[in-house]
């Protein structure tokens, strides 16, 4: 079976600025595929190229069997796209927004009635169908936007940071909806900068400064970081970081919340060396515990591994 998305050396430049630099990956049918990275990493530009909204500078990509550099008209009937701004009309009611998007996708007659009712039920908005969209809470707007993006039952759905600014409860409910769509056979490509959301994806593409720096399942990415990792607590973690980074056994030290995550070259005598270094720096040392890496640990580790020599 051919993949839902096949990308080979895809790039996009804006003048001298390279937004996406020769990324290559495949997405299988029915997969939830995530792009994880900070703002400016190239996630949105990649999604826009695959959705036929932005022409690549170079490289090849097929989506649902269509070349994104060719005629994108047929492609747009096979995909759904939801931007982080939701693309809804605030001065239309919920039903009017659904009717508008249905018309754009050619969903009419009895099929429209069925799809409208499905969207209202899926989004939990049946009682709000005549309410102005601009009056809805953000989480409800988000679910309505998702419903409008899948009115025509696309086989591939692109979600560009769809939970940005949404509260954690609404974010969790939104991901429940994504899971339901994937189970029903929809292929989903989603960008995010939330590490906890990335755990819901079947596979993740980690992006940094326009490049794809790692690609694997969440569990595979965590397993790829085999360097010993310790959690260290101290009263002044910001001041403790430079005291630990100078130790020969320390590969890196960074703040994670109110604690430190310390990556080691060699963990022999690690606790004693850490406590001694902090004591010599006048810092009280609390917990020193070996931990399993999180996705955030892996991402930070990979970013530093790809940094130019001498970079901080």
Image: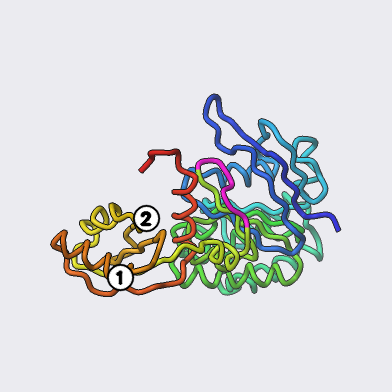
Mark 1 residue element: helix
Query: Which residues lie in the magenta part?
Result: 209-215
Report the front residue among 78 and 151.
78
Q: Is residue 268 above or below residue 84?
A: below
Q: Which mark is residue 271?
A: 1
Q: Which mark is residue 41?
A: none
Q: Residue at x 43, y 38 (%)?
A: 309
First of labels 1, 2 by sequence position: 2
- Colouring of the image: rainbow
Report the front residue among 220 and 163.
220
The quarter of the displayed image where residue 20 is located: top right
Q: Is residue 88 in view from this perspective? A: no
Q: Is residue 62 in view from this perspective? A: yes
Report the front residue among 59 and 308.
308
Q: Using a 10 Å C-alpha cutoff, classify the residue at mark 2 as few (fewer than 14 neighbours), some (14 to 19) or many (20 or more).
A: many
The quarter of the displayed image where residue 57 is located: top right
Apparent side of residue 268 relative to residue 211 in the rendered image (left or right): left
Quarter of the image that includes the C terminus = top left
Mark 2 residue element: strand
The mark lying in front, picked from 1 and 2, is 1
Cα distance in 3D space between marks 1 and 2: 15 Å
Instruction: State the residue position of label 2.
Output: 252
């Amino acid at each position: 079976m051919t993949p839902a998305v096949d990308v080979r050396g895809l790039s996009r430049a804006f003048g001298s600025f390279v937004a996406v630099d020769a990324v290559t990956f495949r997405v299988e049918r029915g997969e939830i595929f995530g792009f994880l990275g900070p703002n400016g990493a190239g996630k949105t530009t990649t999604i826009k190229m695959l959705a036929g909204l932005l022409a690549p500078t170079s490289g090849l990509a097929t989506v649902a069997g269509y070349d994104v550099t060719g005629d994108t008209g047929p492609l747009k009937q096979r995909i759904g796209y939801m931007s982080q701004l939701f693309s809804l009309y605030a001065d239309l009611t919920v039903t009017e927004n659904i009717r508008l998007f249905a018309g754009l996708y050619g969903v009419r007659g009895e099929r429209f009635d069925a799809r409208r009712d499905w969207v209202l039920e899926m989004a939990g908005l049946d009682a709000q169908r005549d309410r102005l969209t601009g009056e809805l809470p953000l989480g409800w707007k988000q679910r309505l936007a998702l419903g409008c993006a899948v009115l025509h039952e696309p086989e591939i759905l692109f979600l560009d940071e769809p939970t940005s600014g949404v509260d954690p409860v609404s974010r969790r409910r939104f991901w429940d909806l994504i899971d339901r769509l994937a189970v029903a056979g929809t292929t989903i490509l989603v960008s995010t900068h939330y590490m906890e959301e990335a755990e819901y994806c079947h596979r993740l593409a980690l992006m940094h400064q326009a490049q794809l720096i790692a690609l694997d399942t969440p569990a595979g990415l965590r397993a790829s970081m085999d360097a010993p990792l310790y959690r260290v607590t101290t009263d002044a973690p910001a001041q403790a970081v430079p005291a630990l980074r100078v130790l020969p056994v320390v590969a890196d030290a960074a703040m994670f919340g109110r604690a430190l995550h310390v990556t080691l070259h060699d963990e022999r005598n690690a606790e004693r060396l850490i406590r001694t270094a902090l004591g010599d720096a006048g810092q009280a040392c609390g917990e020193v515990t070996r931990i399993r890496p999180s996705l955030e640990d892996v991402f930070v580790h990979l970013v530093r591994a790809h940094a130019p020599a001498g970079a901080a």
